[in-house]
Amino acid sequence: MQAYIQHLARLAKLSVPNDKLNTFTEKMCAFMKLAETLPPLEMDERLPAERMLLRPDTVQPSLPRESVLHNAPKVQDEYIAAPGTLQD
Amino acid sequence: MELWKMSATELAALLDTRQVTATEVCASFFARIDETEPKLDAFLHKTREAAHRRAAEADRRLAAGEARRPLEGLPIGLKDNICTRDIPTTCASRILEGFLPPYSATVAEKLDAAGAILLGKLNMDEFAMGSSCENSYFKATKNPWDLKRVPGGSSGGAAAAVAAGQLPWALGSDTGGSVRGPAAFCGVLGLRPSYGAVSRCGLVAFASSLDQIGPMARTVDDLALLFSVICGADKARDATSCALPPESAFDPAAEPSVKGMRLGLLKEYFTAAVDASVRGAVEKAARHLEQQAGAVVIETSLPSTEHALAAYYIISSAEASSNLARYDGIQYGMAAPSGSTDPITAARSTGFGSEAKRRILLGTQVLSSGYYETTYKRAKLLQRQIAAEYKSVFEQCDLLLTPAMPSTAFRLGEKLADPMWMLQSDICTTPASLAGLPALSIPCGFSAQGLPIGMQAVGPRFSEGKLFMLAKAYEALIGGFPMQEGPL
């Protein structure tokens, strides 16, 4: 289970320190126990269907550049600086 | 009477007749905040200077003979997951420490346009994940009725502030019970509106299909007034928001009456899972409404109630894992510690607290191949089943009455080590959340330890007016809801 939690953490871009691993495992197990109580249900077409609502796709004014850059931890030449993903 | 002890509606009447000024109102509430905040810890950020400026502006307008806007001169506080332009909004998380939103939530804009005066941002469980307000990165808020106990969560700061008279009212947010739970623990009214009744634009997302902003207050008239200001369609910014139909309207001038109203007591909520003192208080309130006000009490059932909690945690964690993926320490919020080889993982691992991490991991799991069919899909089907059961039960009843929380407020730290207990604490509130229904927590007495007890009234979608009517009739029957006026 602990290796599985570390795997989930990597997928979610998190790290779980070794000294917290036991607590995380215990809490995850408690949750899984709860999730397993859900009964299997057949899709009943009489039940109300999910509605997917989307807002109109229209051009709107964007946020002011200064206020966006103000919140970025690292700014370079009026751009948000991000870590490189490609190497030489 | 001191101004901070008054309801917003009473203060509005004094402002209307120019018996007090907005500056005096504001000063009285800040004096109460200064007196109680060192013990209560309800606020994360106070906006004292801006509030005094706005109060002076309101006084100038009123002195010039301009008409008073609906909330003009009335103080308010907002849970710290409601964006306020250029005012810190942290969601009580380290990852958003120092974040200044470049825009305001629709509700904040509406309050501003109505003339309300923001006194500050209120503490909460990190990203609204929790039932005790102990998951805040910054501090734990205390319950004004017993400072050794929690105020409930996640809108614990808002509930505690309203109960202690730091504010006449406030806005919280409710995903699985985060307005109703703390309202019950602190002895105030708390409404989770119908899904879509209030715009979510600018509410930092936890579980978007369940999140709703809701008002908290000490009188029904205040609660209904605040709701009337924040509700309504906002299609350009929140596609799920909608205009309310006429039946959700509430007339504060009308005589409150529940004569002939059919109130259903759901038998699934009156079991050993709920403390006997809470069950007893809710049953007593129902009988009171029946015998003294002419309501008709019916015992009824919602069979899928026992599975609602599991379905709620699966759906909300799945959505949370997706919503919280945006925090990368690059665009805004906390930066990664210098020298990190993987800055995004480092920022997220340092910035999120344990509860947020746990829910992200749960969400990642339930959406992963192999688990999706047996957890997420099953939970979504159950959600539809619960909505159908509610629809059926509302053919027999006008409103449902249940406990709002399975216990009274517990001691700080008492439940932190018991993950199952914390999960179970939402047992009464999650079914209505899953069905998108309006639900109102109404104070209905105190335990032998002097701790508030809340009952929950649930109605069909957009039946807010009926919920207010029931609460007002009960308020009149018991002579009003007490506040914590002491020095703490």
Image (cartoon, coloured by chain):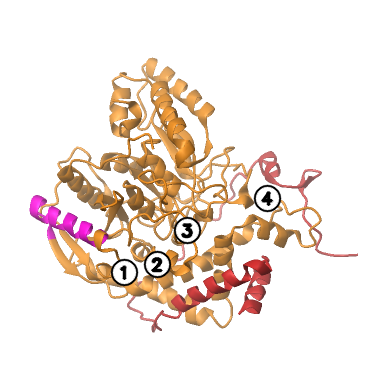
Chain colours: A red, B orange
Q: Position of residue A53 (x, y in %)?
A: 46, 61
Name the secondary structure under disc 1.
Answer: loop
| x and y percentages locating residue B197 in the rendered image | 37, 52
Disc 2 is placed on an element classified as: helix
Q: For the residues carrying marks 4 and 1, which lies nearer the camera in this image?
A: 1
Q: Residue at horizontal 59%, vertical 58%?
A: B353
| Residue B334, label in figure | 4
State the residue position of label 1: B273
Residue B238 position in % (x across, y down): 48, 53
Pointer 4: residues within 10 angstroms few (<14), some, or many (20+)? many
Confirm or deny contact between disc 1 and disc 2 (CB under 8 A): yes
Whether labels 4 and 1 share one chain: yes
Q: Residues within 10 Å of mark 3 (few under 14, many from 20)?
A: many
Say what amino acid the circle numbered 3 marks: Gly
Q: Measured along the vertical axis of the image, is residue B69 above or below residue B379?
A: above
Label 1 or label 3, whichever lies nearer to me, is 1
Quick check: marks 4 and 1 in contact, CB under 8 Å?
no
| Residue at the disc numbered 3 | B130
Q: Are marks 1 and 3 on the same chain?
A: yes
- Give the residue drawn at x 84%, y 65%: A86
Looking at the rendered structure, the kind of residue marked 2 is Gln
Q: Main secondary structure of the magenta part?
A: helix
- Precedes in sequence: disc 4 or disc 3: 3
**Camera-nearest residue between A61 and A6:** A6
Q: Does dot 3 land on a helix, a strand or a loop?
A: loop
Q: Chain of mark 3?
A: B
Q: Earlier in the sequence, mark 1 or mark 2?
A: 1
Residue type at numbered disc 1: Ala
> Do dots 1 and 2 share one subunit?
yes
Question: Which sits in the foreground, B206 or A8?
Answer: A8
